[in-house]
Image: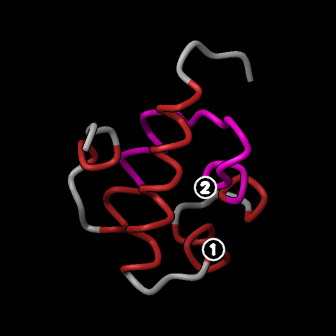
Amino acid sequence: MQTDYPEKYRIMGLKIAYYRKKAGYTQEAFAEKIDKSLNFLAQVEGPGTTRGISLETLFKIADVLNIPASKLLEDD
């Protein structure tokens, strides 16, 4: 994926992984909860890949993790 913001995607993916682990989900279980493939989730969370997600997917991730979607986009 071509983007002007690869670092932002990387950080978002790491945040998703952090909150997923904090909630006690494996990648496989979480992928199932958000109706995505394990491969998709691995690409999103992987620090060496730039994988974008739709707002619909972002909201679903936040909903399953029981956090505001903004938590995944904030600059810390």
Residue reaching furthest bottom?
24
Is 48 in the magenta? yes
- Please tell me which residue is depicted at 50% across the width and 64% down the height of the picture: 17
Which part of the image, by quadrant, shows the C terminus? Answer: top left
Picture coordinates of residue 41 (x, y %)? 65, 57
Give the answer, above or below, for where 14 lies relative to 51.
below
Name which residue type carries label 2.
Glu
Q: Mark 1: which secondary structure?
A: helix
Region rendered in magenta: 42-60
Mark carried by residue 27? 1
Q: Mark 2: which secondary structure?
A: helix
Left/right placement of residue 45 relative to residue 11 reads: right
Q: Residues within 10 Å of mark 2 (few under 14, many from 20)?
A: many
Label 1 close to label 2 by CB (< 8 Å): yes
Is 25 in the magenta? no
Q: Which residue is mark 2?
A: 45
- Please tell me which residue is depicted at 78% across the width and 58% down the height of the picture: 39
Name which residue type carries label 1.
Gln
Q: Residues within 10 Å of mark 1 (few under 14, many from 20)?
A: some
Which part of the image, by quadrant, shows the N terminus? Answer: top right
Between residue 21 and residue 69, name the one nearer to us: 21
Left/right placement of residue 4 relative to residue 74 reads: right
User: Which-is-in-front pick, marks 1 and 2?
Assistant: 2
Count of numbered circles on the image: 2
CA gap between label 1 and label 2 equals 9 Å
Give the answer, above or below, for where 43 lies relative to 52.
below
Left/right placement of residue 41 relative to residue 25 reads: right
- Please tell me which residue is depicted at 63% across the width and 74% down the height of the picture: 27
